[in-house]
């Protein structure tokens, strides 16, 4: 089955505004896992299960004039299973 984008948004924010947004997402994950997204003329709701695969990617893309750094946080789970995707090791953010 091909990929389907359910929601996509991009905007420039201050670091403090990003922190506020991420805190809101974290609070919703702790509460009940229901996340509601909306921007412009689109919206989406997702129910995040109790266990998910969590991935962090930190990348540098360089060309002749500059380097772009990207930091991505990704949650992944199967819609048809209970979300028990376990991997080795533990992740820490200091």
Image: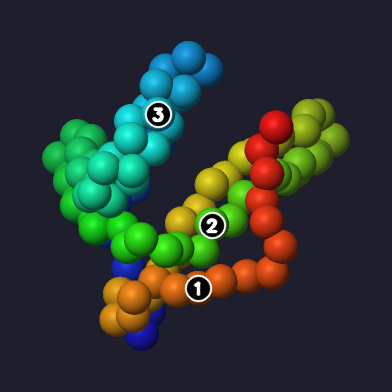
- Viewer-proximal residue, 35 or 59? 35
Answer with left or right where residue 71 lies relative to residue 68. Answer: left
Quadrant of the rendered image containing residue 77: bottom left
Residue at image coords 52%, 17%? 15
Extreme-bottom residue of the structure: 1
Answer with left or right where residue 66 lies relative to residue 16. Answer: right
Location of the C terminus (image quadrant): top right
- Viewer-proximal residue, 16 or 8? 16
Going from the N terminus, do you reach mark 3 or mark 1 first? 3
* Label 3 CA crowd tier, 10 Å (few <14, some 14–19, many 20+): few
Going from the N terminus, do you reach mark 1 or mark 2 first? 2
What residue would you read off at disc 2?
54
Image mark for residue 85: 1
Location of the N terminus (image quadrant): bottom left
Measured as percent of width and height from the top left, residue 26 is found at 39, 38
Secondary structure beneath label 3: helix
Measured as percent of width and height from the top left, residue 90 is found at 68, 56
Answer with left or right where residue 38 lies relative to residue 20. Answer: left
Contact, mark 1 vs mark 2 (Cβ under 8 Å): no
Cα separation, mark 1 vs mark 2, equals 9 Å
Going from the N terminus, do you reach mark 2 or mark 3 first? 3
Q: Is residue 65 above or below residue 74?
A: above
Image mark for residue 75: none
* Label 1 CA crowd tier, 10 Å (few <14, some 14–19, many 20+): few
Q: Can residue 13 be spotted in the picture?
A: no
Residue at image coords 69%, 69%? 88
Measured as percent of width and height from the top left, residue 79 is found at 30, 75
Cα separation, mark 2 vs mark 3, equals 16 Å
Cα separation, mark 3 vs mark 1, equals 24 Å
Measured as percent of width and height from the top left, residue 21 is found at 37, 27
Image mark for residue 23: 3
């Amino acid at each position: 089955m091909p990929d389907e984008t359910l929601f996509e948004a991009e905007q420039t924010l201050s670091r403090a505004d990003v922190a506020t947004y991420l805190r809101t997402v974290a609070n919703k994950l702790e509460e009940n896992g229901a996340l509601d997204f909306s921007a412009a003329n689109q919206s989406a709701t997702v129910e995040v299960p109790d266990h998910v695969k969590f991935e962090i990617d930190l990348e540098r893309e360089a060309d002749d004039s500059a380097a772009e750094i990207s930091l991505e946080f990704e949650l992944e789970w199967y819609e048809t299973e209970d979300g028990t995707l376990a991997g080795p090791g533990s992740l820490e953010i200091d």
